[in-house]
Amino acid sequence: MLKEVHDIVIIGGGPAGLAAAVAARKAGVQDILILERDSSLGGILNQCIHNGFGLHTFKEELTGPEYASRYIAMVEEEKIPYRLNTMVIDINENREVTVISRENGMETIQAGAVILAMGCRERPRGALNIPGYRPAGIYSAGTAQRLMNIEGLSVGKEVVILGSGDIGLIMARRMTLEGAKVKVVAELMPYSGGLKRNIVQCLNDYGIPLKLSHTVVDIQGKERVTGITLAEVGPDRKPIPGTEEHYSCDTLLLSVGLIPENELTRGAGVEMNRVTSGPNVNDQLETSAEGIFACGNVLHVHDLVDYVSEEATLAGTNAAAYVQNRRSEGEAHPVTLKAENGIRYTVPQTIDMEHMNDKVVVRFRVADVYKDRYVSVYFDGERVAHRKKKVLAPGEMEQVILKKEELQKYPDLKEIVFCTEVE
Ligand SMILES: Cc1cc2nc3c(=O)[nH]c(=O)nc-3n(C[C@H](O)[C@H](O)[C@H](O)COP(=O)(O)OP(=O)(O)OC[C@H]3O[C@@H](n4cnc5c(N)ncnc54)[C@H](O)[C@@H]3O)c2cc1C
């Protein structure tokens, strides 16, 4: 059977896939195909009708659909082909992409390079082990957001939100604006998982209480939720007996974490990272499988879409260089990036010092809330950067820029360590 062939195949038409496609086209690749399982391009941004997007990229405050439409317009302008309602069900290390659609059934596409841009999904209730029946009225925050903002449905009137990630915070404000009473946002950890600006603008501005170190220990109601029980948790995250409080409500929203969508990536035999749940990548954002690149939330969960677009532009440019055989020759000089003492991970995980760009942006998240701590960088045990940060929080992504000229001062460099330090 004759296989369809394309230079670059991009899986996912969200902000990452769109920015990668535009960058690859600008780098001179004509034959690009975007595959999107949904009925429109734009990804999760289509349901994020609040503003706060694009401050870095466009120096304007846009809504999610507005931000997405700017990139969709660029894709249209560049006449980059895309297929909607087309789900990728398999890829392999030879970059054969199996897709399924109502129109064409099952097909296999041979890609010169693949860019993974599948985004992430929400952690479901099943992962939480909360006792109780399975009544109506329990939604993940993103599902509630979709029902309200895309389907135009009302989700509930009296609401408790478990989890203070950004989606939970945004939905606390959204439901309040729609006339619901959000009684409390409860967070298991002693700090919020969301951006500071969202705590201020979505909870504080509306007088919605945030209870840190609390969790839901019981859900009441058989047909529909009628209430929940909240309890304080200790340092071991276990509920403290005697701290239970009852809240009557008809809706419980869960905003308890995002999981990068990497079933396809694993299927391709790509090396995965235990902490990010995304693939390990080098400074070109190339995975352990040659010619397979990754960007956006599938690589690691981002806080701001602007960084997704920036990262995806790099993936698109590098995928273009790969299919055009423009990558410079010469033996690789791999340097391992390690996260230690309060830093959970870095992306990328390796840098090829020989072929790296003039600068590499290293992004990471910290493990806890730290005040007046230093972020330090060590080249083979020697401290080369030491920057004081007033506050570091797990909800906010951090970055350090490494310059090639700095690395080249250490010709035998093997390891770069990122850590936090008290002094
Ligand atoms: C509720 C919410 C609120 C947010 N608020 C803000 C904010 O205020 N400001 C801000 O800057 N950022 C915000 N963000 C973050 C930002 O929206 C994300 O970082 C960004 O959308 C991630 O882009 P992405 O392309 O990686 O993923 P997505 O937008 O999720 O796109 C992935 C795409 O891949 C498609 N796909 C997945 N698997 C397949 C497959 N097998 N086959 C074909 N297609 C597939 C999906 O359908 C989807 O369209 C928010 C995110 C969420 C979820």
Image (cartoon, helix red, strand yellow):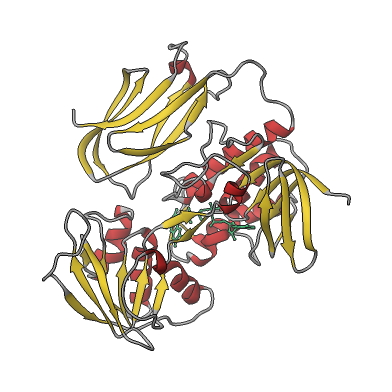
**Which quadrant would residue 363 be assigned to in this image?**
top left
| Residue 221 against residue 395 in the figure, above or below | below
| Residue 68 against residue 320 in the figure, above or below | below
Res 169 seen here? yes
Res 57 seen here? no
| Residue 406 against residue 271 in the figure, above or below | above
Outermost residue to the bottom:
223
| Residue 248 against residue 47 in the figure, above or below | below
Report the side of 64 relative to 215 (left or right).
Answer: right
Q: Report x, y in % for residue 168.
A: 36, 65
Q: Report x, y in % for residue 279.
A: 52, 42
Residue at image location 58% in from the left, 19% down from the top: 332
Outermost residue to the right:
1
Q: How many marks?
A: 0
Residue at image location 35% in from the left, 87% down from the top: 222
Residue sitting nearer the eye, 54 or 20 = 20
Q: Pick the quarter of the image with the C terminus.
A: top left
Residue at image location 62% in from the left, 54% down from the top: 12
Report the side of 189 relative to 318 (left or right).
Answer: left
Q: Report x, y in % for residue 326.
A: 71, 26
Residue sitting nearer the eye, 165 or 254 = 254
Q: Report x, y in % for residue 98.
A: 73, 54
